[in-house]
Every structure is written in structure tokens, then in C-alpha cells.
Amino acid sequence: MAMNKEKKSAERSNEDGIRDPLIQRQKNLTNTGVGAEAHNSPKEQLWMVYLSTFVAVCGSYDFGVCAGYSSPTQTAIINDMGLSLREFSTFGSILTIGAMIGAVTSGRIADHMGRKGAMRVATTFCVIGWLSIYFSKGAMILDFGRLTTGYGMGVYSYVVPIFVAEISPKNLRGALTTLNQVMICCGVSVSFVTGTILTWRVLALTGLIPCIIVIFGLIFIPESPRWLAKRGYQLEFIDALQKLRGEDADISNESIDIQEYTETLERLPKTNLIDLFQRRYLPSVTIGVGLMVFQQFGGINGICFYVNSIFESAGVSSNRGIVIYSILQVVVTALCSPVIDRAGRKPLLMVSAFGLVIGCLLLGASFYLKNHDMSVDIVPMLALTGILVYIGSFSAGMGAIPWVVMSEIFPINIKGTAGSLATLVNWFGAWVVSYTYNYLYSWSSYGTFLIYATVNALAIVFVIKVMPETKGKTLEQIQAIINS
């Protein structure tokens, strides 16, 4: 015991010895005006933040390619491989199974191996998966490749927004984190378009391009400073934060805030899944998991996965509808990305959920009119408008912001466990909605969209009553607000 105390005392002295001179150096820079000058040139100061974000969201782009791969390749894979429709359905849906497994393990991997380590794991699985699909000669290897890319997706879906949130300054955190969703949308849309030109095997090879960028990019970017502080790597923590903020930037206040908050959390006992339901963590878990529930059970994967059949059932040209759908999804997501740090999370979520309600009601009305042979001429336009309102509204807020909030809302000592739970709930919801859509549609085409409209209306109430505004606040300040 005495030796342990001496060791801890020595470690604390070493940490203080490392930290104090560096903090004093930053104060001296501020006093001489160098720190202020750095703050006046954010582009020069934050280039490493932008580079690190770009490398991370290339993983999000690969996520999108994985999600969009099965739709344009269905006919070609069935014909070339001699698959039945049931076998192809297994190929398509097994992606979400892999993603759920990835979600369960992602938090632990990110906590033990670091955020960069988790991205390396995700990229490795995606590379194996894409190569398996490319070289597959039968359904078993094809499914293995799809399952493996799904695992990589599950890890990416957790670690990318977490990493970006932890490296970003508070005034840019929302905009940079939403790039995760922008790149997912780009990956889906590009795979839709290129899938009509390239063979399915070549399309699988295009999924390797973002993987290569991530693998080599991770060599040049720093690890998350908050993770380094949590693990006690003091020299690396200061070095990573300085690289991210700029060589001459004043990091004294930010480094002290991060260390003090991390040290406070480290005094708390390690958590497991059961511990997440303690009173001190319940508000964060309720917000993070609740947003994931509303994001998925509002019907996005039912509409997204079966948008072709929806268009055809409503008498809309599916090719034209898909093109408009893909363009709108990317454009709206990209336009709303820089707005999130000015408008705030709550207003965008409420506007987004309200638009989702309107979109679902328009879709429900179109199929109600069709089923009852009423105003048949306006059914196609009503359905097209409903889908475009729905996907535009989803892209404006509900698509990206739950991931942003998830990256902000959890204390760092439960971020791995709670983040895995939220991501698992998200992927489980994706599977449930995509699996049940056809059954609901067979029961009642317009009733399906009324159910989704109800869920989205409840989302508005949840955001108003439960969710705090996190715009412009440090991760440490957010915890103080939640637990006040």
C-alpha cells in the first residue's frame, strides 16, 4: 500500500511537472498577444481539426456506401450468383445484424484502444468485407462480406461522431459533427448513382477508396485529447491538444478544464450496463437513447429501403424519384450542417420532426385516396411531395442531430458503455422498422404512415420536455446543466 501511494504521488508530481510549465508557457503567450493573434486566425489555427475531421468522416462515407450498396445491385447479384429473392433478402438484411454486433463492442474498443484504434478496427473489417464480396463465388462468402462490412458500420457509427466532438472547439462542434451524416448521405447517393453504371463487383471495390484514406490518414492526425487525458497520458494529451488548436494557441484554460473534469470522473467507479440506470446517469441515457428511438421508429428505414416500391405503388417514375430523392438528401444535409451551431440543436430537431409529421401525413393521404379511388390524378404528386418533405425534413435535423447529441451528452466515464447502448438501440430500431414495413404496408398502406406520423409527433414533445440545448457549450458545461 505504501509503495502504491508513493507511486501515485510520484505520478502526480510528474503530471504537475509536465502540466504547469506548459500552462505557464501558454499564459505567457497570451500576455504577449500571441494567443490572441492565434484566435484571430482560426483557419490557420484549426487546420489539424479540419484534417482530422476529414479523415474520420471518410469512414462515414464508407458507412453510406455499405448502406446504399444493395439497392442498385439487387438484380445483377441475383442473376450472376443465382440467388433466390429470400437469399438476397438475407444478404441485404444481414448488414444490420453486423452493425448491431459492432455497436455492442464499439464503446469498449474505443475506450481501450482509443478513438483512432477503433477506427482502424472498423476500417479493417470493411476492407475484409468488401474484398469478400468482390471475390465471392457463392452466397456464404457474399453474406460473410456483408456481415463484416456491417460490423465496420456499427463501429463507425459510434466512434466517428465521438471522435469529432472530442477534438472540436465548442463553437464548431455541431457543424463538424454533422459532417458525419453529410458523408453518410453522400456515400448512399453516390452508390445509388454509380451502381447503375458499374458492375456490382467493381462497385464493391469503390468501397475500398475511403478505407485507404482512413488507414493512411490516421497516421498523421492526433488521438482524442479527452481520451488521452482519461487514460493518464499527460504528455500526449497536451501535445494532441496543442496540435489541434495550433502551435501558438493558448490551451491553458481548455487543458485545465478537461483534466479537472476527467480527474473528477475517474474517481467514480467503473460502469457497466446496469450502472447506466443509476440516478446520476439516467438523464443522459434517457436523452441519448430516446433520440435514437425516435430517429429510427419514425420510419426512416422503412421509407428509405422501400422508396422504389412506394414510388411505383403511387404511380411515380421510380428513376426520376430516386434521383430527386438522392440530390435533396445530400443538399439539405450539407446546408443544415453549418447552421446547427447558430440555430441550436433543439429548434432544428423540432422543425425536423414537424416536417416528418407533415411528410407522413401527405404519404398517408395519398394512399388513402388511392385505396378509395378518390382524386386519383393527384395521388402521384401527393406521394412524391410527401417523400420529398419527409427526406428533406429528416436530413435537416433528425438524421444528424441525434448523433451529435449522443457525442456530447454522455460523461466520459460512461461514454463507451452508454454510446454502445445508444448505437445498439439505433441499429435494432433500423432492423425492426425495415423488417416490419412490408407487414404494416400489407395491413394498411396509409395506416403505416399514420403510425410513423404519431411517433414523430411524440418526438416533438420529447425534445421540448426532455432535451437540453447544447449549442456553444463545452462537454463539461453540458454535464453540469444535465445534472443541475
Image (spheres, helix red, strand yellow):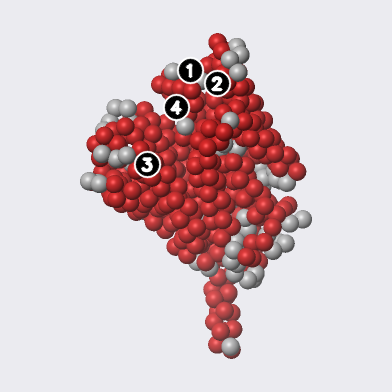
**Real-space Cα separation, disc 3 to disc 1, in angstroms:** 26 Å
Q: Depth check: give the residue in front, 287 or 16.
A: 287
Would you name the residue on which mark 4 appears? Answer: 308
Is residue 215 depicted above or below 442 in this figure? below
Q: Depth check: give the residue in front, 68 or 351.
A: 68
Q: Nearer the viewer, mark 4 or mark 1?
A: 1
Would you name the residue on which mark 1 appears? Answer: 315
Image coords of residue 349 (percent x, y): 65, 36
Contact check, label 1 and label 2, Cβ < 8 Å: yes
- Is residue 27 among what the camera can see? no
Count of all numbered marks drawn on residues in the image: 4
Earlier sequence position, callout 1 versus callout 2: 1
Residue drawn at 63 percent across, 58 percent down:
411
**Real-space Cα separation, disc 4 to disc 1, in angstroms:** 11 Å
Element type at mark 3 = helix
Quadrant in the picture for the N terminus = bottom right
Earlier sequence position, callout 3 versus callout 2: 3
**Real-space Cα separation, disc 4 to disc 2, in angstroms:** 12 Å
Element type at mark 4 = helix
Image coords of residue 177 (percent x, y): 54, 43
Q: Amino acid at mark 2?
A: Ala
Earlier sequence position, callout 4 versus callout 1: 4
Q: Depth check: give the residue in front, 6 or 482.
A: 482
Would you name the residue on which mark 3 appears? Answer: 86
Image coords of residue 436 (percent x, y): 53, 40
